[in-house]
Image (cartoon, rainbow, N blue to C red):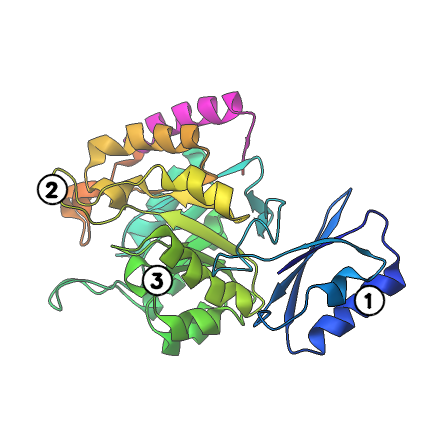
Amino acid sequence: MIIILKQNADKESVEKLRKNITARGLTIHESIGEFAGIIGVVGDTSKIDMSTFASLDCVNDIKRVSEPYKAANRKFHPYDTMVNVAGRITGEGHFTVMAGPCSVESEEQIIEVANRVKLAGATMLRGGAYKPRSSPYAFQGLKGDGIDLLLKAKAITGLPIVTEITNIGNIDLFSDVDIIQVGARNMQNFDLLYELGHSDKTILLKRGLCSTIEEWLMSVEYILSGGNNNVILCERGIRTYENATRNTLDISAVPIIKRLTHLPVIVDPSHATGKTWLVDPLTKAAISAGADGVMIEVHNNPSCALCDGAQSITPDDFDSIMKEVKRRVLFEGKVLS
């Protein structure tokens, strides 16, 4: 249910409305703009007589929301959410570039890559410490030691770090991580999402391998319903019958997400295709589609990478891509942040 407040509504009347709602065991999500305010009511509102609230002086209109996701819904929150991570903004006119290796392999490797991507213009450093792999025999990451190495790279470069959590039991190890990534395989790990919803960390939620957009938004609802509104969505390709690429990048998801929700959305062109030569054109496509950023895998020696070398570009290639990114972002009237 959405309650649209009158312009310059009386504060006492609005507070009375809030108490009336919470007394019924319902949750409130407010969005106050320059000309109007909206109170989103989350919970079982099916038995509530809308006239109960409509009669209040501060109420202009009441509408029911048919979509199952509420807190993520743009109807509840018509203004774009801007996520601030260590002074770096994602969303609403700001474009974020997260770059780094799929997996942290050594101190020398992560620091070299971190320095190179920063020099090229990356605004955040990504790197996998915990790696969920299809094969139990594949490299599983350096785990806690990998996070320590990311923090060393952050201390040297000043870049905020993004890394993936795979197990709710490891959450304490992420206390100094700037953005906690929930990967495609854990998009519907609801216990993990619920716990992250009660944290104060920014969460990067990737779309599941075969998930619909609504399923994706229902997953983000778990995080938002816990009170954590610092969420960035990431389109990373979905599994289809096409085998020319590792996954199929659903570029249409970007404008759809921007229409349905207020949250920022970025694109991962590396995982989306698994091919280095497609990273450049799909990065350009992401910008054109209105994405708020990209996440690109960069490795100083892709042929020797312990994880996903086939989709990792070199620092030199990243330099070239970033020159075009800066030009296009400026053309779109956005700020690289």
Span colored in magenta:
316-336
Closer to the chain start, of discs 2 and 1, is: 1
Task: Please state which amino acid type lies under the numbered disc 2.
Answer: Asn
Above or below, 164 against 319 in this view is below
Spot occupied by residue 325 in the image (x, y as percentages of width and height): 42, 27
Task: Please state which amino acid type lies under the numbered disc 3.
Answer: Met
**Kind of element beneath mark 2:** loop
Task: Please state which amino acid type lies under the numbered disc 1.
Answer: Glu
Q: Which residue is mark 1?
A: 15
- Asked if the residues shown at circle 2 and circle 1 are in contact, with their CB atoms under 8 angstroms apart, the answer is no
Locate residue 57: give its quadrant.
bottom right
**Kind of element beneath mark 1:** helix
The span from disc 3 to disc 1 (Cα, nearest Å) is 37 Å
The span from disc 2 to disc 1 (Cα, nearest Å) is 56 Å
Locate residue 269: give its quadrant.
top left
Spot occupied by residue 335 in the image (x, y as percentages of width and height): 56, 32
